[in-house]
Amino acid sequence: MKAAPFAYVRAAGVGEAVAALSEGALVLAGGQSLVPLLNMRLVRPHTVMDVNRLDLAHLHRSGADLVLGALTRHRQVETSPLVRRDVPLLAAAMSHVGYVAVRNRGTTGGSIAHADPAAELPAVCVALDASFTVQGARGRREIPAGEFFLGPHRTALAADELLVETRVPVPPVGSGHGVAELSRRANDLAVVAVVACVAVSEGTVTYARIAVAGAAPTPIRATVAESVLLGRTPSADVIASAADAVADATDPSDDLRAPAAYRREMAVVLTRRALRQAVTS
């Protein structure tokens, strides 16, 4: 099957893109999510707007944040020395996003706006308290990651708003990180994934961030599990207790890929793995 007919336009600036969004256009960035949806006719837009000419592919440090333009490609994030130094969890998570060919084209903004509850990047953003800069007809605003994802493929973006930038707070120097994921095939979409970032000082956990993808309608921050770790020595028993606390934070559903009970149990197992990675990396 091929896409239904549509008009194609290229936006020359963010203002032009916002105007097209106001008229119902869909955004084409990397195309790794939109093109399959078009070809399966799950979406039938009257206009597809290509934003690849916009100046939104920047990647830099600004104060305490790592800043990603919405058109920054996954592969650029994965291989960036800056990202690997300042937010290594982000670089590690990118290696789980599809194959290299997908990461060469897929964009950070596209992945975030697509809001797949099993995707790795949204989970990292939720874990690290990222925020998103969006621009619409009424100007720019910032949306915290914890308020951005509303459900499967649903976000707080208004119909005329374009995601232009992601700001990720840099974790404490020396933090360890872990990514643990279950998928049916290598580099396939995760059934469940867990990302973790932990800082340990003098044998005690001083910073803990845990998020789970694929176990609820949105990526979830496991704050209770984080509190189990904080102020304690990250022993095997403490890690196991933190992982057990993740189960209550999940809200999985049955589908063709896995039953809800299995997803919940795997969230616990994968949290243990991610935390072990984080405290030893």
Image: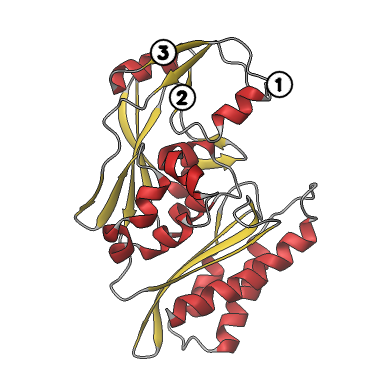
- Give the amino acid at mark 3: Val
User: Neighbour class for label 3 at 10 Å: few (<14), some, many (≥20)?
Assistant: some
Residue at figure coordinates x 59%, y 71% from the top left: 271
Q: Which residue is mark 2?
A: 27
- Left or right: 185 in relation to 223: right
User: Neighbour class for label 1 at 10 Å: few (<14), some, many (≥20)?
Assistant: few
**Label located before the other in sequence (1 or 3):** 1
Residue at figure coordinates x 73%, y 67% from the top left: 265
Which one is closest to the eye, mark 1 or mark 3? 1
- Left or right: 204 in relation to 69: right
Name, please, the residue furthest toward the left: 63
Residue 84 place in picture, x, y as percent = 33, 63
Q: Indicate the quadrant where residue 175 lies.
A: bottom left
Image quadrant in which the N terminus is located:
top right
Q: Which mark is residue 130?
A: none
- Give the amino acid at mark 2: Val
**Label located before the other in sequence (1 or 2):** 1
Residue 211 place in picture, x, y as percent = 53, 61
Which residue is at the front of the view, 242 or 70?
Answer: 70
Q: Which residue is mark 1?
A: 1
Spatial distance from mark 1 to mark 2, Cα to Cα?
A: 21 Å
Residue 249 place in picture, x, y as percent = 63, 61
Which one is closest to the eye, mark 2 or mark 3? 3
Q: Which residue is mark 3?
A: 9
**Label located before the other in sequence (2 or 3):** 3
Q: Callout 1: helix, strand or loop?
A: loop
Residue at figure coordinates x 62%, y 16% from the top left: 44
Q: Callout 2: helix, strand or loop?
A: strand
| Coloring basis for residues | secondary structure
Image quadrant in which the C terminus is located:
bottom left
Q: Callout 3: helix, strand or loop?
A: strand
Which residue is at the front of the view, 172 or 177?
Answer: 177
